[in-house]
Amino acid sequence: MKNFLIILSILFISGLQANAMTESDAKAFFNNYIAKANSYSNELETMYSPKAVIIRQVIKPNGELVNVYTNTQTYLKQMKLSETVAKARNYKNYYSNIKIYKVSNGYKITAIRQPSGDNDKLKMYQIVKPDSKGKLLIVEELMQTRQQIFLKYAK
């Protein structure tokens, strides 16, 4: 019986390690996110949890920051609507100063985002966590923007 419990414990621990997310996994996920976003891939939608918290932090002309919250479904619809114009302009985001931090059951990825054709350096972060099947998903995202149109959604 004692040997059975030891073997069971080893198998359980091995299973946990096999499903454990690493910093390298988070970095690969983020690189994949950048590639999908900049190529306008439909697969980008599958990288978000259906219950993700999406925050657009609007930088007002006076420097004040206003957080505008939305849900995944609304965000993905807005993204699809703006895709045609973005593709026509060959809009892309470039990321620098990428840092990855361990958080409860996942990782927080922070970076500076620079939109193409712009000198702005904007803060962003994503929190990625594995779902019940081990697939990494964005569960929270904040992107700064100077686009004042988002303020109409502020509550």
Image (spheres, rainbow, N blue to C red):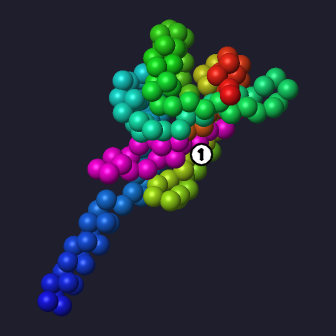
What residue is at 42 percent from the left and 39 percent from the top? 49
Along the horizontal axis of the image, is 53 left or right of 28? right
Q: Position of residue 48 (x, y in %)?
A: 43, 36
Which residue occupies 43% across, 31% down? 35
Q: Nearer the viewer, residue 29 or 8?
A: 8
Give the total number of marks visible in the rendering. Answer: 1
Taking the view exactly as shown, the residue that stands out farthest to the right is 62
Whether residue 147 is visible, yes or no, is no
Residue at which label 1 appears:
110
Looking at the image, residue 46 sits to the left or right of residue 91; the answer is: left
Estimate the x, y position of residue 20 in percent, counting from the top left.
36, 61
Q: Quadrant of residue 31?
A: top left
For the N terminus, which image quadrant?
bottom left
Mainly helix, strand or loop, the magenta region?
strand
Magenta highlight on residue 138: yes
**Is 135 located above or below residue 145 in the figure?**
below
Mark 1 surroundings: few (<14), some (14-19) or many (≥20) residues within 10 A: many
As helix, strand or loop, the secondary structure at mark 1 comes to: strand
In the displayed structure, 112 sits above or below 153; it is below
Q: Position of residue 106 (x, y in %)?
A: 46, 55
The C terminus appears in which quarter of the rendering?
A: top right
Q: Residue 51: say if magenta.
A: no
The image position of residue 147, as x and y in percent, is 68, 20
Residue 55 in sight from this viewpoint: yes
Magenta segment: 120-140
